[in-house]
Structure formats: C-alpha cells, structure tokens
Image (cartoon, grey):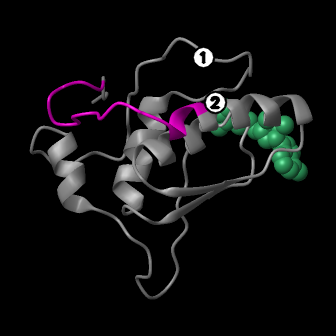
Amino acid sequence: MPIIQLIHGEKRYYFDYDMAKRLNGGKQMRNLWVIPAEKHRTEHPAEKPETLLTRILLLATREGDTVLDPFMGSGTTGVVAKRLKRNFVGIEIDAHYYAIAKARIEGECGDYPAVNLFAGELPFGE
Ligand SMILES: C[S@@+](CC[C@H](N)C(=O)[O-])C[C@H]1O[C@@H](n2cnc3c(N)ncnc32)[C@H](O)[C@@H]1O
C-alpha cells in the first residue's frame, strides 16, 4: 500500500524525526518500510496491520491530536489512535464494517495495555 505525503510551501505538518530514529534503533528511518503481515483481527478484507498505523501515528501526530480516517474499514486507525491517546474521527460507508469498527474501537477505550515501544514489544519492520 503506497503512502504518499504531498507537501507544498511552508512546513505546517508534524513529523517526529527523533521518534523515527528511536523506532529504528538510532538510525534515520528510510522511506521504504517493510512491515510484517499480521493475522487479521476482523473479517474486513483490507484490514491494515496495527504495526503500520502505530508507526504512522507516532511519527505524524502528538498525544491529544485528532486523527481523521474517512475510509475507516475495520477501524484499525481508530484502535491505534485510542491506544496512543489520540482522539479519533472515523467515517465508513458500509454499515457492517462500521459496526465492526465501532465495537473494536470501543473495546480499545477501556483498560488497554500499555505498550513499551522501545522494548521490542512491537514487531516493527526495517
Ligand atoms: C481499504 S478499506 C480501509 C481499511 C482500514 N484501513 C482497516 O484497517 O480496516 C476502505 C474502506 O473505505 C470504505 N469506503 C469506500 N468509499 C467510502 C466513502 N465514500 N465513504 C466512507 N467510506 C468509504 C469501504 O467500505 C472500506 O471499508
């Protein structure tokens, strides 16, 4: 899945270069990422790996920011946003997938486990 960031003019986006280095063992993160596939948690055919969304949200948002996913699918972005203490707004056109995403995200809002990102607990790729 290609991720393309289009930037024009003034730098008004957030990118945590220090976090990128820390997640990559102290080396500058490359722009080609290899993220291991993960077992699907839902029946959505295009469910993304939580590891991928975790990396994206850690690099591009701060705690308390609001993340919008207008094509929410099974809600992976929302689950990860909640886990990382970001606010989340999701849009999904398919009522069945919306219900799956809602249940998944609400399940994440309760007593979710703390993840130590620097102790090798998440299988980040190269
Ligand atoms: C590639 S999937 C998203 C997968 C998601 N990232 C996940 O991890 O499950 C795209 C989703 O966008 C939804 N979608 C397509 N057109 C839409 C629209 N106009 N408005 C809202 N959702 C839409 C589809 O139903 C589909 O579930």
Can you give x and y, in whole percent of width and height, for residue 18 in the image? 17, 58
Asked whether disc 1 touches disc 2, contact meaning CB atoms under 8 Å apart, the reply is yes
Q: Residue furthest top?
A: 39
- Between 46 and 117, the residue placed more toward the observer is 117
Q: Which residue is mark 1?
A: 41
Report whether the residue tagged 2 is closer than 8 Å to ligand 1. Answer: no
Can you give x and y, in whole percent of width and height, for residue 26 in the image? 9, 44
Which SS class for mark 1?
loop
Q: Quadrant of the C terminus?
A: top left
Please state if 11 lies on the left or on the right of 97 as rendered. Answer: left
Answer above or below: position of 42 versus 20. above
Residue 100 covered by magenta stretch: no
> Which quadrant of the view contains residue 76?
top right
Q: Amino acid at mark 2?
A: Arg
For label 2, count other residues whose C-alpha is less than 10 Å away and answer few (under 14), some (14-19) or many (20+).
some
Q: Which residue is mark 2?
A: 104
Please state if 17 lies on the left or on the right of 52 as rendered. Answer: left
Answer above or below: position of 9 versus 83. below
Which SS class for mark 2?
helix
